[in-house]
Structure formats: C-alpha cells, structure tokens
Amino acid sequence: MKIIYLFIIALLVPLFTVAQETNFIEISGQVIDQNTKEPLPGVSVYIKGTGTGTASEVSGEFSVRTKLAFPFTVVFSSIGFQPQEIVVQHLGSKLNIALVTQTMLGKEVVISASRMSDSQLRSPIAVEQLDIRAIRESPAPGFYDALENVKGVQMTTASLTFKVPNTRGFNSPNNYRFMQLVDGVDMQAATLGVPLGNAIGPTELDIASVEITPGAASALYGMNAINGMANLITRNPFAHQGLSVYQKTGLNHVDGIDHGPSLLTETAVRYARAFNDTWAFKVNASYMHGTDWRANTATDQNPNNLNTANPAFAELSGDANPAYDAWNRYGDEINNAVTISGVQYGGRNQSFVVRRTGYWERELVSPTVDNLKFDAALHYRLNEQTELSYGYRVGKMDGVFQRGNKIQLDNVVVQNHRLELKGTHYTVRSYISLENTGDSYNVKPLADNLDISGGGTNAVWGAKFKAALQTELDKDTDLATAMALARQAADQGRPQPGTAAFEELKNTITHINNWDHGAVVPGASPTGGAWLTQQSRLYHTDAQWDLSDKVAFVDVLLGADARLYEVIPDGNNFVDFSRPISERTLPGGNNVYYKKVGAFGQLSKSLLQDRLKLYGSLRLDYNPEFDPKLNPRLSAVYTLAERHHFRASFLSGYRFPSLFEALSYVNNGNVRRVGGLAYINQGLGYLDNSYTLASVNAFNAAVNRDVTTGIPREQAAQQQKELLRIANLAVTSPEHIRSVEVGYKSVLLDNSFVIDADAYLNAYTGFLGQVEVAAPTLGQVGSDASIQDMLAANRARQTRYRVYTNARNTYRNFGSSLGLTYNTPSKFTLAGNVSYNNIISNDEQDIFVTGFNTPKWATNLSFANREVLPNLGFNVVWRWQDAFAWQSPLANGTVPSYHTIDAQLTLKVPAANATAKVGGANIFNNRYIQYAAGPTIGGLYYAALTLDGLLTK
C-alpha cells in the first residue's frame, strides 16, 4: 500500500507545478430573502461546472474569484429556497440576488444511488435523504438519531453512544450487512467489523446531508453493502466558512428506575476558512458525556419446560428454575450448565440441570459513557476543476457493543487519514483506518471468571451444590427450597458486587487477555481474563471516472478499489495461523492479512425524449480466500406526464465474511469461536467431525429421562444416539443476495404533495451465521466412542466450537414502504411513512437460526411548521412499531411493540446567527427495548443552542 501512496503523490506533484498564476476575475454582490428583504447568510455561491465557490456572509455579501473566460454561470442555492442561476457576460456592477422561498418538494439531488448526481425523483433505486434543514429541525436529540424517522430505517440502540441503522430485515446490533460512509470513507472498526454508529463521524455542525440507500448497493459499493448503506456528506470549507458553536444539555433516566436522573452534555465547535479561493481548511471538535441506557431485563430464555432445564419437575418453574438463563445476566449460559447426577429424591436416583449464578449486566458494565471526536481537513484547488484534500479524523468512545456476547467498549480509538483528488469527472481517494480497542472487555468471560475465582470450576461448584442439595432433601426440604439453599452453599466465597474485593478482582480480570476459564482454586489469582485488546489497520484506495462527456451515445462511469486489512495478533481473538496449534494462542507472531480488489462499470442512457432512463452496471470483486464474484444491476426509470416517476431494478450483491467471521480464533468459556476458512479447521476437525449442540442437548435430555427409569447411562446413550445430528459444515463462502425492487414517486397538488412508494423481494443464499458444535475426543462422529463423549457427564471429552458458516436454505424476504408529505399553504407540513417487512418460512430446519429480527410494521407520523410565528418553528413526530421475534446467539425472545412521541421548538435569532432548540425524545418516557437483551430506553429531554456563521471574515 505504501507503493500506492507514493505513486499517487508522484502523480500529484506535476499538477502543482502546472498551476497557472493568471489573473482572477472577481464577482461580488449580496443575497437577500425576496419576501423579508433581509440578508441571507450561508447561501452557497459557486460557478457552475467547477469547484469554485463560497458562502454568503452574515450581511448576505459574497465574493467569488475565477480564472474562467466570460460567459459563465453562477449558481445560488440555500436550504429552503429555490436555486437561482445567473449568467455573467462581463465585469460590471455587483450582483443583487433575491431568493424565493422553496415551496416545491422532491427536488433534492442525490449521489448514492448511481454514484453520480441524480434528481431524487428519478433515482434508479430507493434513496432517502435528510438535508441540513431537516436534521436541525428534527426533534431527535442529534442528527444521527434522526435517521430513526426515515422511511424504512430500523435503528438499533446498543448504547447511548452507539446506534446501528438497518433496512429490509436480518437486523443485528453488529450489522455486518449495512455500510456507512463519511465523504466516501468506510467508518467501520475493522476487527469489530461494523461502523461504530457516529462515534468517529461528523459533528452536527459539519454535516451537510445524509443519504440512505435501502437494499443491496454492492453493485457499485462492493462488500458489506447488501442490506443498504448510509452516506454522510460533510460541508466543504470553501462554501461554508466561519465559526460555529453547538451546546446541548439534556436529562435522561428521569424516572430513576435504572439509574438516577442524569445530565447529558454535548459540545461541538467548527471553524473553516478559505484563502484566495485556492486554500481552505476546517477543524471540528466535539465532546459528549452522559449516563448510558441500562440493560436490566430478567426474562428467562431457558424456562423449565425446555429440555435444557428440568421439565419433569413442575415445582422448579418460574423463579425456582435452577437452570434460569436471564437476558441480562451473564455466567448462567449453557456452557455453565452443570448436570447434578445421582441425587436421591422421590425414592430413586435423579439428575438435575443447574446453571451457575452469574452476574447482572448492571454489575459488570459502567453506566458512564463519553465520546470525543476531532477532525480536520485541508483543501487545495489546483485549478477551477480540480481539488486536492487531506482529512484526518479520530474518535474515542465508550459504550456497549453486542456480537456473540456483550462487549464493554472502553477508550476505543478509531482514526483515519484520507487523501483525495477530485475533478469534474473523476475522483481518486486513499485512506488508512487505525483501530485500537483500548481497555474494552467481554462481559461474558468476566462473569465466568468472577464465578470461578470465587467458587471454583463448574465441576467443583457442582459438587458443592450436589452435597448441599442432598443434605436438604434428606431433611425433607421441598425441592424448590432445597435448590435455593444448595445454591447459597455453593456460592460461598463468591465476590459480591459493590465490594472493594469485587472491584479489585474485576479490574484484574479485565486486564488479562485470555477469555478461557481461569483459576481452579477459589481465592487464587485468576488466570482467565476478559480483556478485548485488538489493533488493526485498514488500507483502502478507490477511483472513479465519469466518461460521459467523451462517449456520445451513452453515459459511462468506471471505478475500481483495493482494500487490505492488517491485524496484529493478540493471541486471543486473532492468532498467527502459521504457528502450530499448541502455540497459536501465544501473543505476537506474524500479522494477519485479509484483502480484496474490485472494479465496476456503469452505463446509463436516456431515451424517449428523456422520459426513460436505463442503467446497467457490473461489478467484479475478488478476495484470494474465495472465487471471484460478479454483481450485476439493471435499472429503469420512466417519467409519465413529467410528474409520475416509475422505477424498477434487479440487484445482486455479495458479502465477504468480516474479519471476525473469517479469521477469529477465540476461546470463550471453553467454547472456541472460530472462522470458517479451511486452513483454520486443519487439525481441529470442527467442520467434518462434530455434532450440533442443539442435538447434543436433545440427546442428553432423552438420556436423563431414561436414567430416571433405572436404565444405565451408557445403555441409554446407545438407545438415544439417533438424536445426535452430525454437523458436516461447509467451508465458509461469501453471502449472496438477489433482489428485485420497484418504486413510484410523484409530486402533485401544485408541487406541494409527494408520494414515494417502493416494494422489494430479496433472496439470500449462503447466509452467514454461527452454529455451535461439539467435537468428540474419541473416534469419528457416529462411532460408539464419540456417542459416549457427548454425554453431559463427559463434558471434558468434548471440544465445543462456535463456527461461522453458511446456512443451507435460501431465505426470501419481502416488503414495501410508503411515504407521504404535504406542505400546506400556511407552511404546515404533514408527513408520514409506513414500512412492512416479512420473511417466507422454510419447511426444512437449517443448521442455525438466521434471525430476521425485524418488525412487520413500523410507522412515523410528523406535524411541523418551520415558522408558525416569525422565527419560531416546531416539529412533533410519533413513531410506532409492532412486536417481533428476536433471535441471536446471545438472547432470544419477543421484543414488545412500542410507540414514542418526540417534539421540539426552534427559535431563530438572525441578528445573532443563533438557533435555540428545546425538545425531547420519547417525551412521555414510554420505556421500551429494541432487541432481546438490549438496553431499556426512556425519555431524553434537551435544550440546544447553535451559533453559526461567526467570524466569516
């Protein structure tokens, strides 16, 4: 990659030397509001067909310099006003421009749909957009929160600092299938595999617009964008200069249920300056601090009627269930299930399934979170059409992240460097992303190792439990009470939350980089830990060239990209696979590399007097671990009577496994999570010599039933062996989606009413997920020896793996959405959208549960007026979604339906360039969750002040 950077620099040097110093022509004037006659600050003023431009000052005055010869066109545009173009024929008096309030809807320009500027009305696929005015007038606490009100977007709140958008199904808090870009730069944290919300993204002061593309965007954007993408576009320092300041103070946890009422503060500053229309820079900084939403749900996902509990004993139901597995308690998972055998009860030997006590999430994670962000950019115009820029961005965040387990993110730092050369018809961009997970830790092994350090291994703890249980039963204590007393006895010496000893032990465990079970002697120093220490580098280069002006009969767009992931092995999550198996988990070794290259071409053509536009694109992606993959896309947009726009598309996309899905090698509570590549499996055999854990659980439940009737355990195992299901896992391959999408968009009623509708049908093959398997120590699967290894009493003779692999079924999901917006003559805006998503069930059970994790119905309704009184506006949004089933490796269950109301008042003070906003999200504090084991979200109330356009000169 260093060679690529040197090559780019070598290309750029001659461009500096040929930059000519001819005399500039200066065009100046003033922009006012035609209705109020007041000066308009912040109006974008640029010369059409070039990158030359500026923004009007507080006085409405502007000045633009150019080297172009007369005549040329100057464009004036501002949010809320109709754009205006003025042809300048010669030097003369100053230009006095009066802009007219924009009352027409649907005229937005988007670039994400085809990587070129398109009218949103004629976009070939569905694209949703939030411009800066919509963002600032949203009642959501921040612009990223406002995405939750966009048609078709499902937002998952993992933490106050970390929100994950998704569209069209198969949602998860670690959404590998949704891409997020900021000015073309992928915002993912490479080893975690997902963008960390807006933790390193732009501040509200620097955001210009957000474009959401639902559905597969892989044909143009490559890997990961198969469910959709968000493109965050920031403000150019040439066009938006001056000092801006933002201060927000909020309050959450007002009911005191999960935490006492807590302040949230966010401060942001932006400064930009241009020099002689040649150089410009901008600097942004922000800091947010608050108390996180707490996850504290006690739902039991292992009720006593399941075979993984004790269904033969009705008295152990509810709170008396000794196999209780709570959503937000850790250490009570299935790998901590202890089978207590040979207990004398009811006149015969009995077996019981008991789980370790564990710790609640609130006892293991910090409620305090913050987010520090900084970015800076330097822009240089080599000539009227060419701009070179360098940008640096860094973010430090805390919060909670969910993959297979909950992760406490603590001092995670992600930074990137971007170098971009942009001309009228081309863009070349390179960037480096650096990730360091800091002091983060995994909550599950923390709970496991706390339990082990205080109560011994599962076997030791189980022996204490059995002895105490038998003692109580011999006293004729009822079974439920005996179970509770036995747990108290087995938990003697267990570290208690809130004590100094607990905090000291927790601090020790969270700084040990080994997730396996640790000390076997209660009270001894732990050897097992929970530290998540990962460092990675992502190198990326892409280029795009628009050849439309060089080809007469068709518009042509070409592009290519290359990406390299470099991971520093930590000996726990990622290891050096060139080492022998016995040495893999040692820290250090050779860095791990994962790479891909891709290229695409797009043709578009207007026909029938510009009423019909056809698009065709083809992309080729190659990762050396897999065969090359082709992604086609075909689209058509037809305009009827100049206002009815119909579109149809066929889309295809591939997703290569993320770093963790492909290359992980982590032992977590005696379950090793492994990537599905063939060379990782060598010497381990989890792909070809294992049983699925689900079948092992069913097998042991049947064996336990037989044992209670007096059948010897070994004999019962032979009788029930048909329940064991051989896994036969395939080597991991890329995930594939094919999608058909149709849509309609129109502006009616004298340009005041917008209808936007779309529908889609997706088919996923090779869906990537996790399956847990048990590999026998003795013999091949199917042999008598391997069957005996699967007995719960022989857990030490099983090696458990959680494997990333592909589903065997094809999964089809479908849906539609409808958005309506109406602007009344009196400036009131009524808007609403409704989305429907569903999945077609398969008759045959798959190797793992895919987790559609999406409500069938969701809707948003809003009522607003930007100026109900002079300089005073309001916005109210009602949001509702219905209940749905959530399935994941961490937690399963039903997410209840919920509805919220957000509201805000905005007061503008033009004389001071100030905007004050008072509002709240979920103003009636209707507590809800968005996914199983997720945090409970309540009301957040805030007041914010923005000062914009200061020190413009």
Image (tube, grey):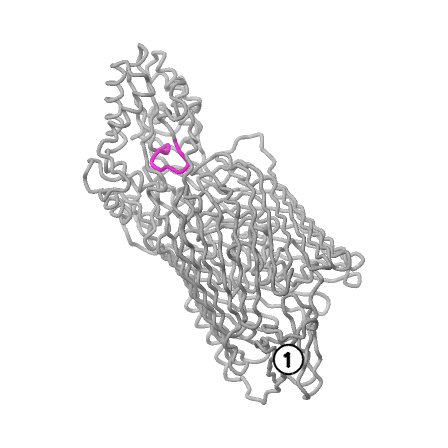
Residue at the far front: name it. 869
The image quarter containing residue 567 is bottom left
Q: From this viewpoint, is residue 871 visible?
A: yes
Label 1: how many residues lie within 10 Å, few (<14), some (14-19) or many (20+)?
Answer: some
Q: Is residue 705 above or below residue 519?
A: above
Pinpoint residue 544: horizontal percent, then vertical percent.
Answer: 57, 66
Magenta span has 330? yes
Taking the spot 32% from the left edge, 11% from the top edge, the residue there is 346
Pinpoint residue 230: horizontal percent, then vertical percent.
Answer: 55, 56
Residues in magenta, as a range: 325-335
- Residue 607 falls left or right of residue 773: right
Pinpoint residue 85: horizontal percent, then vertical percent.
Answer: 70, 75
Residue at the far top: name it. 347
The image quarter containing residue 915 is bottom right
Label 1 secondary element:
strand
Magenta span has 928? no
Pinpoint residue 166: horizontal percent, then vertical percent.
Answer: 54, 48
Residue beneath disc 1:
30
Q: From this viewpoint, is residue 8 visible?
A: no
State whether the magenta stretch is mostly helix, strand or loop. Answer: loop
Towards the viewer: 104 or 213: 104
Looking at the rendered structure, the kind of residue marked 1 is: Gln
